[in-house]
Amino acid sequence: MLRAPAKPGALLLLLLVCGTALQGARGQDSTPEAADAVPETPAAVAAPSAKDRQFREGAEARPFQAEVSRMMDIIIHSLYSNKDIFLRELVSNAADALDKIRFLSLTDKSQLGEGDTAKLEMLLSVDPEQKMISLRDRGVGMTRADLVSNLGTIAKSGTAAFLEQMQKGGDLNLIGQFGVGFYSVYLVADYVEVVTKHNDDVQLIWESKADGSFAISEDREGAPLGRGTQINIYLKDSCQEYLQEDKLKELVQRYSEFINFPIYMLTHSTVDKEVPFEGEEGAAPEELSDEEKSAKGDVEVADEEDEEGEAAKAPKTRTVTEQVAEWKALNDNQALWLRPPGDVSDEEYAKFYKALSKNEWDTPLAHSHFKAEGDVEFKAVMFVPGQATPDLYDNYYARKPSIKLYVRRVFISESFEDLLPKWLSFLVGLVDSDTMPLNVSREMLQLHEGLKVIRKKLVRKAIDMIKKLADGQDRALKELEEKDAAKAAAAEGEEAGAEKAAGEEEERKKLEEKSKAYTKFWTGFGKSLKMGLIEDQGNRRRLLPLLRFHSSKSPDKQISLAQYVEGMKEGQKHIYYLVGTSKEEVAGSPFVESLVEQGYEVLFMTDPLDEYVMQNVQEFEDKEFANVSKEDLKMGDKDEVEKKAQKKAKEEFKGLAKWWKESLGSAVENVKVSKRLATTPCVVVSSKYGWSATMEKIARAQTLGDADRAKYMRGQRSLEINPRHPLIRELKAQQEASPDSAAVKENAQLLYQTCLLESGFMLDDMKDFNARVFRLLAKDMNVKDLSVAREEAEPQGADDGEEDEVAGAAEEEDAAAAGGAEVPDDAELQRMMEQMKDMGMQHTEL
């Protein structure tokens, strides 16, 4: 049976209803953006109870590859403490996607799109209600095949390699190296959605609870992305701290501060705003009657003027608090190292240094910005801090270098120990490599061939940077000297050149700044260069010109070794130096007397490290170093007169030397005439390869020092005598007159001990030395006997009698005080005794 056709009116009504509904639906999808509206991240499509959610109806469910399932199980049940890396991995992947679309747009501009879609950026937002974090990029996006291959069934060896590394006890931080960094999201999430749109496919949704399967479906519910990918991360209950905006901001600035693309975060803040206020509703301003106005003295004016006055009155306002949401950039600092060095100003370098060092009050002394090409390509920026930290040398071997490691602008490590040696740990900077593997561990990077190349290049550039700082100071000092000389010579025309003088004054200030730069560096970091000389054998020749010391000719201003060599005497073949505890001690040492008197310059080394440095350094510019406190000191060539005089003195004092050696025994190896003394009677010198006096003090101060080894390393000592000194000549005369005299031997021993102390050594028997000094003082003060008589004790009986008298007097005083009467005198006592005798009492009993 056929149904009757519908009436035309009913059909028309049905069409109108459908059209209205369709128009309303379209209106919701195409709401125009307001001028000041905040762009919104596409809404999440998962329910709040994400972990209990089922896959969408009609979604294509697939199992994960077996290796992927094992890997995700490891991640989900991991106790790995550094969960922060999930955001680093996602941002890194987003940056790669943006790089790809930018590359494609170079040949096909249509790939980039128009409007907001063409903006190469990342958007980060938080939804506290759904406990969700969203990260969106406008990158290349993924097709259905990409979702399956990249997020489900990775047909690569990366997953297997990651599993193998984890079984060996590897670090979960390595996850990104194997191309599976996306799965680190499950460190913090129990449900993840990936909404993506590729130019060659429809908008798709990938979703998984990491329960062994995932699902892909077409996204017909969410707002269109245009192009790119949005990851919705539903956090575990134990990871709710990542919902805090400050936490995410800190993570982005730590790991992704120098990503090439801007990262914006939707932030919420509270602001105060002034709004009009008209008072309570229904309340009208009270009108005054004419009588009240006249009572107040108001002047009556025209109605038109009243109306104009009311219009001129300012409207009342009140302060209200509003919640404001806005997108803020999180990575303002540009990747400065990507720019050519010539395009970067000193102010930009200083700002970049402060961002790296997190020290707003320090200004770098020098910087090095370079790019290395070849088998290993990398860019680096290094800075010398303006001042050393107070704890720089407190724990030298445990300190890590302040060089950050980036791989393709992605932060990898805050401090990578193998990039720089310990002695350069004071430097601040970063290295960005395009050829190193992403997210490398310390163990794996040590095996990477590129590490040695990077390390070698960084050390060379660091030394060049420091050398440039030193050369700049030398040039500045020279220019200042020339300007001072020119200023002194030009006495005319000063008034006419006032404006020119102002410019010269500014230039002079800059020169004075440069003239102190390396001195400031040496004061703060000089020990580091000395440690480099000890530890880095390959760079010793490069480091030697950077050393600075005071000297006998320059006690107030430090000089370099090159300046010392330049000022050497004609025929001088050695660089003379002496190590001590202070500049004053070294300057007054008997070892430098003759050298200074003859015009030789002696370097003053007052740092304990100098002893170790000179053990590892033999020469500079073919000039050997000579410690003036060691034996066999060689000075300039002598003429025939000096040679004859030296030979005559040796022959003259040969007997004294032999006698003194026998007297001292094994304390010294030999006694000989000295050529290094001027006003001191004698000195004790170390053997050529033995420890100096300063080194002995250092060894004795070691907590875990070996006494036997110290005794062996001390070596043999020699006593050198000054044949011109009166004490030596008098001792020679006394020895020749009475070689067996105890007094002569006493004087010789005391003289030796005194010179031993003046030479910087320590006495093994200090009590013996003190006893000799006391005997010498007694002789000078005419004290014949130094023995001290013991104090004689007084007789015991006398003491007892005195104690009885004192006690009796005390008792009498107490009795008198108790009775309130005076103490009787002797006559009264006699009378009382007579009375007691008459009463029959015996005197003896009383």
Image (cartoon, grey):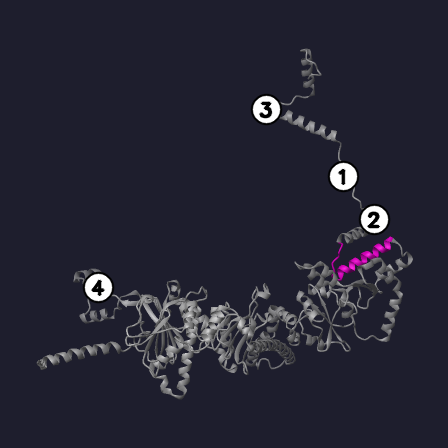
In the picture, the disc for residue 782 is: 2
- Mark 1 vs mark 3, CA separation in Å: 42 Å
In the picture, the disc for residue 791 is: 1
Observer able to see residue 272: no
CB under 8 Å between discs 4 and 2: no
Question: Which span is picked out in magenta?
Answer: 742-765
Task: Indicate whether 367 appears above or below 814.
Answer: below
Residue at 54% across / 83% down in the picture?
373
Label 3 environment density (alpha carbons within 10 Å; few <14, some 14–19, many ≥20): few
Which one is nearer the viewer's eye here, 614 or 274? Answer: 614
Type of amino acid under label 2? Asn
Mark 1 falls on what kind of element?
A: loop
Q: Nearer the viewer, mark 4 or mark 1?
A: 1
Label 1 environment density (alpha carbons within 10 Å; few <14, some 14–19, many ≥20): few
Type of amino acid under label 1? Glu
Using residue 557 as the reference point, say whether residue 574 is left or right of it: right
Type of amino acid under label 4? Asp
Mark 3 falls on what kind of element?
A: helix
Looking at the rendering, in which quadrant would you find the N terminus?
bottom left
Mark 2 falls on what kind of element?
A: loop
Q: Quadrant of residue 521?
A: bottom right
> Residue 31's x, y, as percent?
26, 77
In the picture, the disc for residue 818 is: 3
> Residue 40's x, y, as percent?
32, 74
Identify the residue under disc 4.
Answer: 298
Type of amino acid under label 3? Ala
Which one is nearer the viewer's eye here, 369 or 560? Answer: 369
- In primary-sequence order, the first of circles 3 and 4 is 4
Most distant residue in the right direction: 737
